[in-house]
Amino acid sequence: MSYQFIKEKLDKNSVVILDGGNGGELEQIGAKMDKDLWAGKSAIDDPDKLFQVHENYIKSGADVITSNTYAITPISMKEYGYEKFTQEWNKKTVEIALKAAESSDREIAVAGSVSTSGSWDKLTLSEIKPGFTEQLKILSDSGVNLIILEAMTSKDETVETIIECSYKINLPVWLSISCALDKDNGNLMHGYQESIKNSKAYLYNDFKKSISKFSKMHKGPILIAHSDIKVTNDAVKILKKNHSGIVGAYPNNGYFEKPHWKFIDNVSPSSYLDEAKSWVLNGAQIIGGCCGIGPDKIKAISFLK
């Protein structure tokens, strides 16, 4: 179990399959959702269900599974009174993913998820650095094979700070960026909209400009994530034109309404495969799904490997 086989596939211009969303799938199979940390406590409250989710993605063809650490950042753990459990819960969560990978009869890589979950926007850049640095070290020390800076829905300067923090670990790092359509002018923006039907949006900068900045700092893979399926293909095209490295995509289906994921506009596995074919045709080498995308859709797109 290592990153080497992933690197070899990417070097050969092959497609790598990432898993789908952990939180949404955990909710689908009946795991307890925490009012503050969503699915973040699953390693503590429902470890068998978390193992099952990882196992289901592996059986569906995923080459990379992601640790369920998205919601248990040091910032969110401190915010909700769980600060003393930050290391323990992150390590336990990674252990379950590693166990699932080791149980497979083929090579599986485990990615450590680092996100901007929590009230990061209320902190200065100097205040957020220790938290991101801490989680990156915990995940690295726990044995993950790579890091995904997940679904960066944050302002450009916050993303740039997190990228800088990632330089301190000796692991491959993938950067995933969220984008949304500005309905006022039709432009694709770096930011986040809960769904095409939901008007609540956080838009920060022109997507192309943001990608150009991030690409100068981060030479590893950049992926479109935590974004609506309907805007993903256009985003992949922009990303491919403005990033010299490997690109990928793993969009959402539905939206979050604390503490539950809302499954709306559900796409069939065959329709999701059609979408994924477009991403690959436009240069994506890493494809998977975020929240609302389960094993059935990962199985469908695994035929693109």
Image: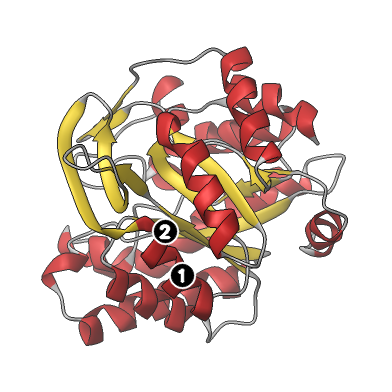
- x 54%, y 53%: residue: 223
- Amino acid on which the number 2 mark rests in the picture: Trp
Badge 1: few (under 14), some or many (20 or more) residues near its Cα, within 10 Å?
A: some
- x 63%, y 14%: residue: 270
Q: Is residue 26 above or below residue 95?
A: above
Q: Which quadrant would the C terminus be assigned to in this image?
A: top right
Nearest the camera: 109 or 77?
109
Q: Which quadrant would the N terminus be assigned to in this image?
A: bottom right
Q: Which comes sooner in the sequence, label 1 or label 2?
A: 2
- x 54%, y 34%: residue: 48
Q: Residue 269: x and y, percent?
A: 60, 16
Indicate which disc residue 212 carries: 1
Q: What is the C-alpha distance between the residues marked 1 and 2?
A: 35 Å
Q: Residue 25: x and y, percent?
A: 47, 28
Q: Is residue 270 above or below residue 61?
A: above
- x 15%, y 75%: residue: 123
Secondary element at tag 1: helix
**Residue bearing the label numbered 2:** 89
Nearest the camera: 222 or 74?
222
Between disc 1 and disc 2, the foreground one is 1
Q: Residue 113: x and y, percent?
A: 49, 58
